Image (cartoon, helix red, strand yellow):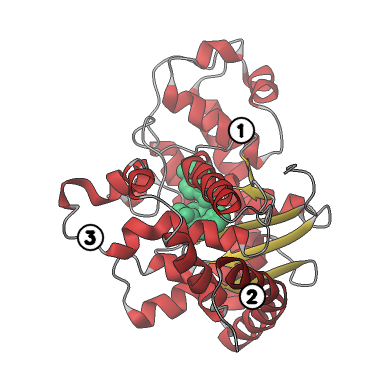
Protein backbone atom coordinates (compact mmCIF):
# COMPACT_ATOMS: atom_id res chain seq x y z
CA UNK A 1 0.00 0.00 0.00
CA UNK A 2 1.09 3.57 -0.45
CA UNK A 3 1.10 5.94 2.48
CA UNK A 4 -0.36 8.67 0.31
CA UNK A 5 -3.62 7.08 -0.67
CA UNK A 6 -5.48 8.46 2.38
CA UNK A 7 -6.95 11.93 2.68
CA UNK A 8 -4.72 13.92 5.05
CA UNK A 9 -6.38 14.03 8.44
CA UNK A 10 -4.92 15.27 11.71
CA UNK A 11 -5.74 13.57 15.02
CA UNK A 12 -4.29 14.41 18.42
CA UNK A 13 -5.27 14.40 22.07
CA UNK A 14 -4.51 15.53 25.61
CA UNK A 15 -5.20 13.59 28.81
CA UNK A 16 -7.34 15.30 31.44
CA UNK A 17 -5.18 14.39 34.42
CA UNK A 18 -4.04 17.52 36.23
CA UNK A 19 -4.35 20.78 34.31
CA UNK A 20 -2.53 22.00 31.22
CA UNK A 21 1.12 22.95 31.44
CA UNK A 22 3.26 24.99 29.06
CA UNK A 23 4.68 21.83 27.40
CA UNK A 24 1.17 20.74 26.38
CA UNK A 25 0.51 24.16 24.92
CA UNK A 26 3.79 24.73 23.06
CA UNK A 27 4.47 21.08 22.15
CA UNK A 28 0.95 20.28 21.04
CA UNK A 29 -2.07 22.62 21.26
CA UNK A 30 -0.44 25.73 19.76
CA UNK A 31 0.71 23.64 16.80
CA UNK A 32 -2.78 22.13 16.44
CA UNK A 33 -4.18 25.63 16.05
CA UNK A 34 -1.66 26.28 13.27
CA UNK A 35 -2.85 23.16 11.40
CA UNK A 36 -6.50 24.19 11.44
CA UNK A 37 -7.88 25.12 8.05
CA UNK A 38 -4.96 23.43 6.28
CA UNK A 39 -6.20 19.86 6.77
CA UNK A 40 -9.15 18.18 8.41
CA UNK A 41 -8.40 18.35 12.15
CA UNK A 42 -9.76 16.23 15.01
CA UNK A 43 -8.77 17.02 18.59
CA UNK A 44 -9.74 14.96 21.59
CA UNK A 45 -9.72 15.13 25.39
CA UNK A 46 -8.71 11.55 26.06
CA UNK A 47 -10.56 10.78 29.28
CA UNK A 48 -10.37 7.00 28.79
CA UNK A 49 -6.59 7.33 28.81
CA UNK A 50 -6.71 9.39 32.01
CA UNK A 51 -8.40 6.58 33.98
CA UNK A 52 -5.46 4.22 33.38
CA UNK A 53 -4.34 5.77 36.67
CA UNK A 54 -6.77 6.66 39.48
CA UNK A 55 -8.90 9.75 38.87
CA UNK A 56 -11.39 11.20 41.30
CA UNK A 57 -14.73 11.05 39.41
CA UNK A 58 -15.84 14.61 40.19
CA UNK A 59 -12.44 16.04 39.36
CA UNK A 60 -12.26 14.07 36.13
CA UNK A 61 -15.39 15.72 34.74
CA UNK A 62 -14.09 19.12 35.69
CA UNK A 63 -10.61 18.31 34.40
CA UNK A 64 -12.09 17.23 31.06
CA UNK A 65 -13.90 20.57 30.78
CA UNK A 66 -10.74 22.43 31.76
CA UNK A 67 -8.68 20.82 29.01
CA UNK A 68 -11.44 21.56 26.50
CA UNK A 69 -11.55 25.17 27.76
CA UNK A 70 -7.78 25.40 27.33
CA UNK A 71 -7.99 24.16 23.76
CA UNK A 72 -10.81 26.57 22.92
CA UNK A 73 -9.05 29.49 24.61
CA UNK A 74 -5.84 28.70 22.72
CA UNK A 75 -7.70 28.96 19.42
CA UNK A 76 -9.17 25.56 18.57
CA UNK A 77 -12.31 26.55 16.71
CA UNK A 78 -15.15 24.01 16.85
CA UNK A 79 -16.39 25.18 13.46
CA UNK A 80 -13.02 24.30 11.91
CA UNK A 81 -11.98 21.30 14.00
CA UNK A 82 -13.85 18.43 15.58
CA UNK A 83 -13.38 18.80 19.36
CA UNK A 84 -14.77 16.14 21.71
CA UNK A 85 -13.98 13.92 24.66
CA UNK A 86 -13.03 10.34 23.92
CA UNK A 87 -15.55 8.49 26.13
CA UNK A 88 -18.48 9.99 24.20
CA UNK A 89 -17.44 7.98 21.15
CA UNK A 90 -17.66 4.32 22.17
CA UNK A 91 -15.87 3.19 19.01
CA UNK A 92 -12.50 4.19 20.58
CA UNK A 93 -12.81 1.46 23.19
CA UNK A 94 -14.19 -0.99 20.64
CA UNK A 95 -11.35 -0.55 18.15
CA UNK A 96 -8.95 -0.50 21.12
CA UNK A 97 -10.05 -4.06 21.92
CA UNK A 98 -9.44 -5.21 18.36
CA UNK A 99 -5.96 -3.70 18.52
CA UNK A 100 -5.29 -5.41 21.86
CA UNK A 101 -5.62 -8.59 19.81
CA UNK A 102 -3.23 -7.29 17.12
CA UNK A 103 -0.47 -5.71 19.24
CA UNK A 104 2.07 -8.10 20.76
CA UNK A 105 3.02 -8.22 24.43
CA UNK A 106 6.66 -7.89 23.38
CA UNK A 107 5.87 -4.52 21.75
CA UNK A 108 4.16 -3.25 24.89
CA UNK A 109 7.12 -4.35 26.99
CA UNK A 110 9.32 -1.96 25.03
CA UNK A 111 7.22 1.14 25.73
CA UNK A 112 9.46 3.48 27.69
CA UNK A 113 6.57 5.56 29.02
CA UNK A 114 4.98 2.48 30.59
CA UNK A 115 8.30 1.55 32.18
CA UNK A 116 8.72 5.09 33.53
CA UNK A 117 5.19 5.27 34.90
CA UNK A 118 5.05 1.75 36.30
CA UNK A 119 8.54 2.08 37.79
CA UNK A 120 9.27 -0.65 40.28
CA UNK A 121 5.54 -1.12 40.88
CA UNK A 122 4.69 -2.83 37.57
CA UNK A 123 2.71 -5.64 39.21
CA UNK A 124 0.31 -3.19 40.82
CA UNK A 125 -0.53 -0.80 37.97
CA UNK A 126 -3.73 -1.23 35.97
CA UNK A 127 -3.96 -3.46 32.93
CA UNK A 128 -5.24 -0.35 31.14
CA UNK A 129 -1.92 1.44 31.69
CA UNK A 130 -0.16 -1.43 29.95
CA UNK A 131 -2.62 -1.47 27.03
CA UNK A 132 -2.63 2.35 26.81
CA UNK A 133 -0.65 2.57 23.53
CA UNK A 134 -3.04 0.26 21.71
CA UNK A 135 -5.99 2.48 22.72
CA UNK A 136 -3.96 5.42 21.43
CA UNK A 137 -3.51 3.61 18.11
CA UNK A 138 -7.28 3.12 18.03
CA UNK A 139 -7.85 6.86 18.64
CA UNK A 140 -5.81 7.69 15.59
CA UNK A 141 -6.75 4.87 13.23
CA UNK A 142 -10.48 5.11 13.98
CA UNK A 143 -10.38 8.26 11.85
CA UNK A 144 -7.72 7.01 9.45
CA UNK A 145 -5.56 9.75 10.94
CA UNK A 146 -2.51 10.40 8.78
CA UNK A 147 -0.77 13.14 10.78
CA UNK A 148 -0.36 13.24 14.55
CA UNK A 149 1.16 16.43 15.99
CA UNK A 150 2.64 15.55 19.39
CA UNK A 151 5.62 16.30 21.60
CA UNK A 152 8.70 14.11 21.40
CA UNK A 153 7.58 11.96 24.37
CA UNK A 154 4.76 10.47 22.26
CA UNK A 155 6.95 9.45 19.33
CA UNK A 156 7.24 5.81 20.35
CA UNK A 157 3.47 5.52 20.73
CA UNK A 158 2.89 6.85 17.21
CA UNK A 159 5.48 4.43 15.89
CA UNK A 160 3.59 1.62 17.62
CA UNK A 161 0.44 2.85 15.87
CA UNK A 162 2.24 2.27 12.57
CA UNK A 163 3.28 -1.20 13.71
CA UNK A 164 -0.32 -2.06 14.61
CA UNK A 165 -1.62 -0.76 11.26
CA UNK A 166 1.08 -2.69 9.40
CA UNK A 167 0.33 -5.95 11.23
CA UNK A 168 -3.43 -5.56 10.85
CA UNK A 169 -3.08 -4.85 7.12
CA UNK A 170 -0.71 -7.78 6.72
CA UNK A 171 -2.70 -10.31 8.78
CA UNK A 172 -6.00 -9.50 7.07
CA UNK A 173 -4.45 -8.94 3.62
CA UNK A 174 -5.83 -5.44 3.31
CA UNK A 175 -4.63 -1.85 3.05
CA UNK A 176 -7.41 -0.53 5.27
CA UNK A 177 -5.36 1.42 7.82
CA UNK A 178 -2.90 4.21 6.91
CA UNK A 179 0.65 4.39 8.22
CA UNK A 180 0.40 7.47 10.39
CA UNK A 181 3.15 10.10 10.49
CA UNK A 182 4.13 11.67 13.80
CA UNK A 183 4.50 15.44 13.33
CA UNK A 184 7.19 16.46 15.79
CA UNK A 185 8.77 19.74 14.77
CA UNK A 186 9.68 23.24 15.95
CA UNK A 187 11.54 24.40 19.05
CA UNK A 188 8.99 23.04 21.55
CA UNK A 189 9.17 19.29 20.92
CA UNK A 190 10.51 18.75 24.39
CA UNK A 191 10.01 21.55 26.92
CA UNK A 192 12.03 20.78 30.02
CA UNK A 193 11.43 21.18 33.72
CA UNK A 194 12.45 24.67 34.97
CA UNK A 195 14.41 23.23 37.90
CA UNK A 196 16.14 20.35 36.12
CA UNK A 197 16.95 20.81 32.44
CA UNK A 198 17.27 17.10 31.68
CA UNK A 199 13.74 16.17 32.81
CA UNK A 200 10.69 17.07 30.74
CA UNK A 201 8.11 19.50 32.06
CA UNK A 202 5.02 17.58 33.15
CA UNK A 203 1.82 18.04 35.10
CA UNK A 204 2.85 15.44 37.61
CA UNK A 205 6.28 16.78 38.63
CA UNK A 206 6.85 17.15 42.38
CA UNK A 207 7.19 20.92 42.65
CA UNK A 208 4.87 23.48 41.10
CA UNK A 209 7.91 25.73 40.54
CA UNK A 210 9.24 23.34 37.88
CA UNK A 211 6.41 23.99 35.44
CA UNK A 212 4.27 26.82 34.10
CA UNK A 213 0.58 25.96 34.37
CA UNK A 214 -1.76 27.49 31.83
CA UNK A 215 -3.78 28.86 34.75
CA UNK A 216 -0.82 30.63 36.45
CA UNK A 217 -1.21 34.39 36.84
CA UNK A 218 1.31 36.98 35.64
CA UNK A 219 3.14 37.27 38.99
CA UNK A 220 3.57 33.53 39.32
CA UNK A 221 4.81 33.16 35.73
CA UNK A 222 7.40 35.91 36.34
CA UNK A 223 8.46 34.33 39.64
CA UNK A 224 8.86 30.87 38.09
CA UNK A 225 11.04 32.14 35.25
CA UNK A 226 13.06 34.28 37.64
CA UNK A 227 13.78 31.23 39.81
CA UNK A 228 14.33 28.89 36.86
CA UNK A 229 17.66 27.11 37.09
CA UNK A 230 20.34 28.45 34.74
CA UNK A 231 24.11 28.57 34.64
CA UNK A 232 26.39 31.55 35.30
CA UNK A 233 27.29 32.17 31.64
CA UNK A 234 25.58 34.80 29.48
CA UNK A 235 23.78 33.71 26.31
CA UNK A 236 26.28 32.61 23.65
CA UNK A 237 26.94 34.19 20.25
CA UNK A 238 25.67 31.14 18.34
CA UNK A 239 23.23 28.30 18.99
CA UNK A 240 26.09 25.78 19.18
CA UNK A 241 27.15 27.46 22.41
CA UNK A 242 24.02 26.00 24.06
CA UNK A 243 24.93 22.39 23.32
CA UNK A 244 26.01 21.47 26.86
CA UNK A 245 23.67 23.91 28.61
CA UNK A 246 20.25 22.19 28.87
CA UNK A 247 18.63 24.77 31.16
CA UNK A 248 19.75 27.70 29.01
CA UNK A 249 18.71 25.87 25.85
CA UNK A 250 15.26 25.22 27.33
CA UNK A 251 14.60 28.89 28.12
CA UNK A 252 15.72 29.89 24.62
CA UNK A 253 13.44 27.21 23.12
CA UNK A 254 10.49 28.42 25.20
CA UNK A 255 11.12 32.01 24.09
CA UNK A 256 11.34 30.89 20.45
CA UNK A 257 8.16 28.82 20.58
CA UNK A 258 6.18 31.59 22.30
CA UNK A 259 7.35 34.19 19.80
CA UNK A 260 7.07 31.98 16.67
CA UNK A 261 10.79 32.30 15.99
CA UNK A 262 13.68 29.92 15.61
CA UNK A 263 16.06 29.49 18.55
CA UNK A 264 18.78 30.88 16.22
CA UNK A 265 16.81 34.11 15.83
CA UNK A 266 16.44 34.40 19.62
CA UNK A 267 20.20 33.93 20.06
CA UNK A 268 20.88 36.52 17.36
CA UNK A 269 18.76 38.99 19.34
CA UNK A 270 20.13 38.18 22.80
CA UNK A 271 23.76 37.15 22.09
CA UNK A 272 25.91 38.09 25.08
CA UNK A 273 22.92 39.03 27.29
CA UNK A 274 22.96 37.92 30.93
CA UNK A 275 20.05 36.24 32.71
CA UNK A 276 19.17 39.53 34.38
CA UNK A 277 18.11 40.74 30.97
CA UNK A 278 16.83 37.56 29.33
CA UNK A 279 14.65 36.17 32.11
CA UNK A 280 12.49 39.32 32.55
CA UNK A 281 12.11 39.53 28.75
CA UNK A 282 11.01 35.89 28.67
CA UNK A 283 8.59 36.44 31.56
CA UNK A 284 7.06 39.49 29.82
CA UNK A 285 6.67 37.56 26.58
CA UNK A 286 5.11 34.57 28.36
CA UNK A 287 2.65 36.78 30.23
CA UNK A 288 1.70 38.61 27.02
CA UNK A 289 1.06 35.33 25.19
CA UNK A 290 -0.44 33.25 28.01
CA UNK A 291 -2.63 35.66 30.00
CA UNK A 292 -5.22 36.09 27.23
CA UNK A 293 -5.50 32.29 27.15
CA UNK A 294 -5.87 31.90 30.91
CA UNK A 295 -8.40 34.74 31.06
CA UNK A 296 -10.48 33.13 28.31
CA UNK A 297 -10.16 29.70 29.99
CA UNK A 298 -11.55 31.13 33.21
CA UNK A 299 -14.42 32.76 31.32
CA UNK A 300 -15.29 29.50 29.55
CA UNK A 301 -15.11 27.53 32.81
CA UNK A 302 -17.90 29.75 34.18
CA UNK A 303 -20.24 28.16 31.66
CA UNK A 304 -19.68 24.39 31.90
CA UNK A 305 -22.94 23.65 30.06
CA UNK A 306 -21.59 25.45 26.99
CA UNK A 307 -18.37 23.39 27.06
CA UNK A 308 -20.43 20.20 27.40
CA UNK A 309 -22.54 21.28 24.43
CA UNK A 310 -19.46 21.89 22.28
CA UNK A 311 -17.99 18.49 23.23
CA UNK A 312 -21.33 16.78 22.55
CA UNK A 313 -21.58 18.35 19.08
CA UNK A 314 -17.99 17.34 18.38
CA UNK A 315 -18.68 13.77 19.51
CA UNK A 316 -21.59 13.53 17.09
CA UNK A 317 -19.35 14.62 14.20
CA UNK A 318 -16.61 12.25 15.35
CA UNK A 319 -19.04 9.31 15.48
CA UNK A 320 -20.10 9.98 11.90
CA UNK A 321 -16.51 9.36 10.76
CA UNK A 322 -15.66 6.63 13.26
CA UNK A 323 -18.69 4.33 12.96
CA UNK A 324 -18.23 3.29 9.31
CA UNK A 325 -14.52 2.67 9.93
CA UNK A 326 -15.30 0.52 12.97
CA UNK A 327 -18.00 -1.42 11.10
CA UNK A 328 -15.64 -2.07 8.21
CA UNK A 329 -12.97 -3.23 10.69
CA UNK A 330 -15.43 -5.69 12.27
CA UNK A 331 -16.25 -6.96 8.81
CA UNK A 332 -12.57 -7.43 7.90
CA UNK A 333 -11.95 -9.29 11.17
CA UNK A 334 -14.98 -11.52 10.56
CA UNK A 335 -17.21 -10.39 13.41
CA UNK A 336 -20.83 -11.11 12.51
CA UNK A 337 -23.27 -8.19 12.41
CA UNK A 338 -26.96 -9.17 12.16
P1 LIG B 1 -0.36 14.16 27.30
O1 LIG B 1 -1.72 14.47 27.79
O2 LIG B 1 0.66 13.67 28.26
O3 LIG B 1 0.24 15.42 26.56
C1 LIG B 1 -0.48 16.09 25.54
C2 LIG B 1 0.47 16.60 24.48
O4 LIG B 1 1.42 17.49 25.06
C3 LIG B 1 2.72 17.08 24.70
N1 LIG B 1 3.66 17.40 25.80
C4 LIG B 1 4.82 18.04 25.62
N2 LIG B 1 5.41 18.55 24.52
C5 LIG B 1 6.61 19.15 24.69
N3 LIG B 1 7.23 19.28 25.89
C6 LIG B 1 6.68 18.78 27.02
N4 LIG B 1 7.27 18.92 28.20
C7 LIG B 1 5.41 18.13 26.91
N5 LIG B 1 4.58 17.55 27.81
C8 LIG B 1 3.52 17.09 27.11
C9 LIG B 1 2.63 15.58 24.49
O5 LIG B 1 3.68 15.09 23.69
C10 LIG B 1 1.27 15.47 23.82
O6 LIG B 1 1.39 15.73 22.43
N6 LIG B 1 -0.78 9.70 25.08
C11 LIG B 1 -1.03 11.12 24.91
C12 LIG B 1 -2.47 11.45 24.63
C13 LIG B 1 -3.08 10.71 23.48
C14 LIG B 1 -2.86 10.97 22.11
C15 LIG B 1 -3.69 10.06 21.41
C16 LIG B 1 -2.03 11.86 21.43
C17 LIG B 1 -3.99 9.70 23.57
N7 LIG B 1 -4.36 9.33 22.33
C18 LIG B 1 -3.71 10.02 20.03
C19 LIG B 1 -2.06 11.82 20.04
C20 LIG B 1 -2.88 10.92 19.35
C21 LIG B 1 -0.63 11.83 26.20
O7 LIG B 1 -0.60 11.26 27.23
O8 LIG B 1 -0.44 13.14 26.05
Between 259 and 335, the one nearer to me in the picture: 335
Mark identifier at residue 187: 1
**Distance between the alpha carbons at the discs numbered 2 and 1:** 40 Å
1 and 3 marks in contact (CB < 8 Å): no
Residue depth check, mark 1 versus mark 3: number of the one nearer the observer: 3
- The residue labelled by disc 3 is 125
- In the image shown, does 73 or 36 lie closer to the viewer? 36
- Label pair 2/1, CB-CB below 8 angstroms: no
Instruction: Identify the residue at image location x=49%, y=38%.
Output: 191
Q: Quick one: SS at disc 1?
A: loop
Image position, residue 123 (x, y; %): 16, 56
Q: Secondary structure at mark 2?
A: helix
Q: Is residue 313 left or right of residue 20?
A: right
Residue 330: quadrant of the picture:
bottom right
Q: Earlier in the sequence, mark 1 or mark 3?
A: 3
Could you say where residue 48 lies in the image, as x and y percent from the top left?
A: 44, 70
Q: Secondary structure at mark 3?
A: loop
For the point 83% across and 57% down, the residue is 37
Of the two numbered discs 2 and 1 on the same chain, state the one appearing first in sequence: 1
Neighbor class of circle 1 (other Cα within 10 Å; few <14, some 14-19, many 20+) is many
The disc, 3 or 2, on the residue closer to the chain's N-terminal end is: 3
Residue 255 showing in the rendered view: yes
As drawn, the label of residue 327 is 2
Can you see residue 20? Answer: no
Label 3: how many Cα within 10 Å (few below 14, some 14–19, many 20+):
some
Q: Is residue 36 left or right of residue 334?
A: right
- Front residue of 311 and 218: 311
Q: Residue at x 40, y 58 (%)?
A: 132
Name the spot of residue 242 as percent of width and height, x first.
51, 16
Amino acid sequence: MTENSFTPRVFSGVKPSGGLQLGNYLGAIKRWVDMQGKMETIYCVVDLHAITVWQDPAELKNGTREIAAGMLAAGIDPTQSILFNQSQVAAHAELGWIFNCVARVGWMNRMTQFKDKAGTNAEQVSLGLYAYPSLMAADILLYHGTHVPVGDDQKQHVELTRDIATKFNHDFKTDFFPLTEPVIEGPAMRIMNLREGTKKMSKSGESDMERINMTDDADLIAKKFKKAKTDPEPLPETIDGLAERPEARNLVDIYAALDDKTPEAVIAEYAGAGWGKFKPALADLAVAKLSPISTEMARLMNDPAEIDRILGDGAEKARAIAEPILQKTYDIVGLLRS
